[in-house]
């Protein structure tokens, strides 16, 4: 909480490596800290949170207790299921499958259900509404299959949760988490080095298709990644052109990275530029191969990951030794604080975040 106030973050998103890794526990922890410090907050969700039973796994979920004066953004159906007394303040103008989405203020404390919107664009607008109604910090619970809440266009800080539910082997969990942290915290491309005008840069930010840019101030190729034979087309183009930067809008998948792995010599001087690290959807093994073979990748807008929380207990009933788990994560996450919020174990790796070296040297 002190770090958030010190840095004056106005929004923070929570994303998880898997279900049951403690994301909602971390979310509730920050809520409690805000309540204790009487810090005006708004809360929202890209998924559905606060219900007693998980609709997918059938397991119990931590409920969300909201204090008096908390702002919430949720659909009508979820608002009606909340035990807290709520005063509707504003209709956001958006409608979900659970009804119109309203911003409400808690008048009597109680448990609430959150179901705001899966749309990052709508969430951005809703965050601004809550800020306008007095929230100094808006806390967004991200859905498992959507990391868009971590995008810098949506929230200005992010907390990642990981845990034993991700895999039964602790070393695999550490490797997967380290890879995901690397992906989320790619270094920022120096936009001045792109040698493109502000209008061209705006095209990159607003692009709906993949774009390839060259040495001078224009877009050389617009390409739809959904088209048949996309990778072959891209490779053929890169082999016959002098391309210094390739900008990929949208998801970065294994087949794309494999182009750079298989053609490492030809493409060694080509930098892959992604919108942000949340768009990278590859597992830790594919990521490891890519870093070793090419690894020349940067983000147009970096994600501000501020901490990693961990849960040593799995929904399967097995668990990792808590201190050993925190230590292993911290050792492989240079520059990050790792916290077990239930047991109060906290470690920070003071080293710099050399993302290129992390998997190739430590794991």
Image: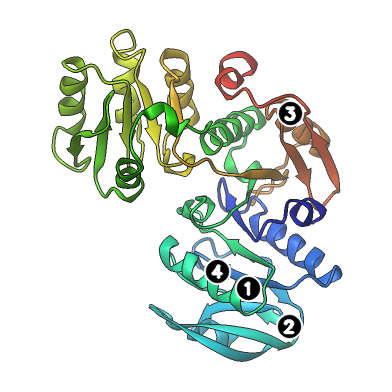
Q: Disc 4 versus disc 2: distance between alpha carbons?
A: 16 Å
The residue positioned 35% from the left and 29% from the top of the image is: 195
Which comes before the other along the chain, label 1 or label 2? 1
Q: Describe the element under mark 3 as helix, strand or loop.
A: helix
Q: Disc 1 versus disc 2: distance between alpha carbons?
A: 23 Å
Q: Which mark is residue 69?
A: 2
Tag 3: Cα neighbours inside 10 Å, few (<14), some, or many (≥20)?
Answer: some
Task: Tell me residue 88's x, y (percent).
Answer: 58, 90
Task: Tell me residue 131's x, y (percent).
Answer: 61, 72
Which comes before the other along the chain, label 3 or label 1? 1
Q: Is residue 213 visible?
A: yes
Taking 216 as reference, is 16 above or below it? Answer: below
Q: In the image as oriented, which residue stretches furthest toward the top?
A: 265
The residue positioned 26% from the left and 40% from the top of the image is: 210
Q: Disc 3 versus disc 4: distance between alpha carbons?
A: 35 Å
Taking 27 as reference, is 207 above or below it? Answer: above
The residue positioned 19% from the left and 18% from the top of the image is: 241
Residue that carries the numbered disc 3 in the rendered image:
328
Q: Disc 4 versus disc 1: distance between alpha carbons?
A: 25 Å
The residue positioned 53% from the left and 60% from the top of the image is: 57
């Amino acid at each position: 909480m002190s770090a958030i106030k010190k840095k004056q973050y106005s929004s923070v998103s929570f994303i998880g490596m898997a279900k049951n890794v403690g994301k909602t526990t971390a979310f509730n922890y920050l809520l409690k800290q805000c309540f204790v410090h009487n810090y005006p907050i708004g809360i929202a969700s890209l998924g559905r949170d606060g219900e007693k039973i998980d609709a997918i796994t059938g397991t119990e979920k931590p409920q969300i207790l909201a204090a008096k004066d908390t702002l919430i953004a949720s659909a009508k159906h979820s608002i009606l299921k909340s035990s807290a007394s709520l005063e509707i303040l504003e209709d956001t103008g958006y409608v979900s499958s659970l009804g119109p989405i309203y911003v409400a203020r808690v008048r009597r404390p109680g448990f609430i259900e959150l179901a705001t919107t899966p749309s990052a664009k709508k969430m951005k607008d809703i965050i601004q509404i809550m800020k306008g109604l007095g929230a100094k910090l808006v806390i967004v619970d991200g859905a498992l299959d959507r990391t868009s809440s971590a995008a810098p266009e949506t929230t200005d800080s992010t907390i990642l949760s990981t845990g034993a539910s991700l895999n039964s082997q602790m070393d695999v969990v550490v490797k997967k988490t380290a890879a995901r942290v690397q992906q989320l915290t790619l270094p920022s491309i120096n936009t001045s080095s792109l040698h493109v005008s502000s209008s061209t840069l705006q095209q990159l930010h607003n692009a709906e298709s993949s774009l390839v840019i060259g040495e001078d101030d224009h877009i050389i190729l617009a390409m739809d990644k959904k088209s048949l034979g996309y990778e072959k087309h891209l490779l053929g183009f890169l082999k016959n052109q002098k391309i210094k930067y390739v900008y990929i809008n949208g998801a970065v998948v294994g087949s794309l990275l494999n182009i750079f792995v298989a053609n490492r010599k030809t493409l060694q001087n080509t930098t892959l530029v992604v919108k942000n690290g949340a768009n990278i959807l590859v597992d830790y093994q594919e990521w490891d191969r890519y870093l070793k073979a090419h690894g020349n990748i940067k983000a147009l807008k970096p994600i501000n990951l501020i901490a990693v929380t961990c849960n040593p207990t799995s929904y399967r009933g097995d668990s990792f030794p808590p201190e050993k788990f925190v230590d292993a994560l911290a050792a492989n996450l240079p520059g990050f604080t790792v916290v077990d919020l239930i047991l109060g174990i906290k470690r920070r790796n003071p080293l710099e975040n050399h993302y290129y070296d992390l998997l190739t040297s430590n794991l």
